[in-house]
Image (cartoon, rainbow, N blue to C red):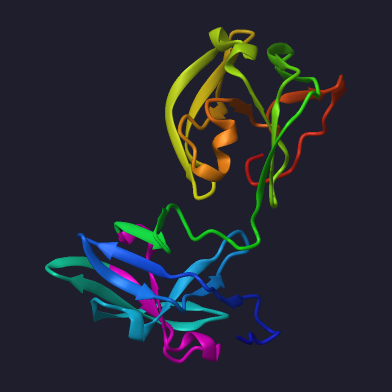
Amino acid sequence: MGTPQKTRVRIEQSGKRVRAYLGGSLVADTTAPILVWEIPYYPTYYIPVADIRAELVEDGPGEHSPSRGDATVYTVKVNGTNAPSAAVRYLDSPLEDLRDLVRLDWDAMDSWFEEDEEVFVHPRSPYARIDILPSSRHVRVEVDGVTVAESSSPRMLFETGLPVRYYLPKTHVRMDLLEHTDTVTRCPYKGDAEYWSVRANGELRKDLAWSYPVPLDESRKVTGLICFYSEKVDIFVDGVLQERPKSKFA
């Protein structure tokens, strides 16, 4: 599919079967989903209108996008369940590829499936990859000058577009300095993460460390291991202080 050079919107055909459900009923079922990068970090699914199985009731005009044009917003209705303003179409988009497509609000749906596997948070990018490698490099983590973790058996996680992450066994972490919090984040590649704050030199630094107790299959090698934000702590690898990376988590 072609995208005019003057826009920054990337549009790409996916070969996956994609389904969305609401209230236990099928809202969309397509073998021709379109990935649209509305923001640089990850794509969203646009569904051919012919593959929408629910009723779309027009709510009115939505927001204007400089690249996609004027939006029309719809309520999604299926078997007595309504999701207000949960669908968007760009009927007169300057991007021809979008005119016969529907974007369903990801969070407004109860569940999404790629083939027969449920996916979470947002569609998985075909250009994002995770490699988890065992290592014998010596990793030491300091918070305000206090060593809170030290290991010569880290698992190193390499994820497209993000800094390398060092996952350490809990037995190599000063768990007495960590305080579990209620924070939970979700990743479409790794699963649900739990968090810890770190107390060092009398100060509590919130949500500096996390772990995936039950990660998704592709990330199971980090099950139960602890990782610290390299953007917010000092990490030494083989005795060398690493430069704090610049990322959206800094």
Which percent across, then down, holds residue 141? 72, 19
- Image position of 191 (left or right of 249): left
Q: Does the segment drawn in magenta span residue 209? A: no
Which of these two is toward me, 114 or 10?
114
Residue 222: x and y in percent read 58, 32
Q: Quadrant of the N terminus?
A: bottom right
Q: Is residue 173 left or right of residue 117?
A: right
Rendering quarter of residue 19: bottom left
Percent x, y for residue 161?
70, 52
Please tell me which residue is depicted at 28% across the width and 63% down the height of the picture: 21
Question: Image point 49% across, 67% down: which residue?
Answer: 44
- Determine if the magenta segment contains residue 105: yes
Vertical arrangement, residue 225 with respect to residue 188, above or below? above
Looking at the image, which is closer to me, 137 or 4? 137
Question: Looking at the figure, which quarter contains the C terminus?
Answer: top right
Q: Quadrant of residue 56?
A: bottom left
Question: Is 127 in front, or is 71?
Answer: 127
In the rendered structure, the answer to whether residue 4 lies left or right of residue 135 reads left
Per the rendered image, the range of residues in magenta is 85-109
Image x and y of residue 51, in percent? 34, 81
How many numbered marks have been drawn onto this rendered protein structure? 0
In the displayed image of the protein, which residue is found farthest to the left?
Answer: 80
Residue in the picture at 64% in, 8% down? 201
143 over 101 or under it: above or below:
above
Asked if residue 217 is positioned above or below residue 198 in the image, the reply reads below
